[in-house]
Image (tube, rainbow, N blue to C red):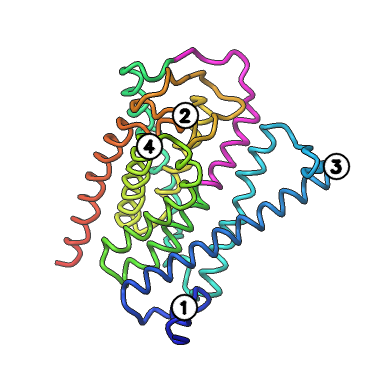
Amino acid sequence: MKIFIKNLSPFNNRTDMPTAMLAVKKLLAFILCYWAGLLLAEGAVIGVMFAYGKNFMKGEMFSDGVMDLLKYYGMIVILGVSVLYWKLIEKRKLSEMGVTKHIGGWFIGALIGAGLLTVCVAAITLTGGISLEGALATPDVPMILLMLGGFIIQGAAEEFLCLGLVFCSLRDRVPLPVAVAVSTLAFIYPHWSTLRESEPQYILAGLLGLVVISLVFSFITLRTKSIWAACGLHSVWNFCLSCVLGLNLSGSEGASTALINMRSVGENIFNGGAYGIESSIITDIVIAALAVATGYLAINKDRQQEV
């Protein structure tokens, strides 16, 4: 039993174990880094609030916009924890984590993210699930640019954990479907607390959406041998959804300021209800199509390299 527990411990870099055990071990490492980073980040935010004379115990808070910035920029702590874990516990190079020098892949992912969101929103608008109220007359451009920086950090932090710490760690040691499945479970984990508050139909659609976008992230990483494209896609999707269109993001209301004023019309399976378009069946179908395309390209490339 002692050896079994030692093997599963995320505090060592042993990998000579059955596939199922290794998968569980990597999930434990993910949970460890996620919560350690989250607690440290929240501590840092509380410290900043106290430094500026805000006592959150008494309900004293910054404005919604500033709290959003603190939340997203604070995720750099989670990113840092994942890198430290990789270097100190895994004892591996960052390039093996998918953090390569080819950072230009981030911009390719950003373009894919913007295009993917455009297709999803346009399709949902055609069903009447979303209405366009027009551009805002006086958007807070400095705040929007600051939010872009926050979303760049937030998207990278999640992908460093799910793709870097989990997928890239497993892909050469276990069958590819196992590596993808474990990475997908890790991706679902931080979203579940918000998603589970929705009605059943939105929970199911939201889970499907998380699965198919996680497949896209994994296949893009496999194809490019880097996590940068996935980081770009993730960050730009979130930023544009919240700060450009002003729509709900993963169950949270759109940013306090946005460039365009779009609103969901009622709550239905086409617009995803209060959770937002990430629980829309239309979004699921569009992203699933992209998952099939990226999966074909990634797996076909691997087969060609093996020949």
Q: Distance of mark 2 from mark 1, alpha carbons? A: 42 Å
Residue type at mark 3: give it: Gly
Q: Which residue is mark 1?
A: 13
Tell me if mark 4 has few (under 14), some (14-19) or many (20+) residues whose alpha carbon lies within 10 angstroms of its own: few
Q: Quadrant of the C terminus?
A: bottom left
Q: Is residue 172 above or below residue 134?
A: below
Q: Which residue is mark 2?
A: 274
- The structure residue drawn at horizontal position 49% and vertical position 30%, both measured from the top left corner, is 248
**N-term mark: 3 or 4:** 3
Q: Is residue 52 left or right of residue 301?
A: right
Q: Distance of mark 2 from mark 4, alpha carbons? A: 12 Å
Q: Which residue is mark 4?
A: 200
Q: Is residue 160 left or right of residue 75?
A: left
**N-term mark: 3 or 2:** 3
- The structure residue drawn at horizontal position 66% and vertical position 32%, both measured from the top left corner, is 65
Q: Nearer the viewer, mark 3 or mark 4?
A: 4
Q: Position of residue 289 (x, y in %)?
A: 24, 39
Residue type at mark 1: give it: Asn
Q: Position of residue 86 (x, y in %)?
A: 51, 69
Q: Which range of residues does the magenta coloring cover?
A: 132-154
Mark seen at residue 32 = none
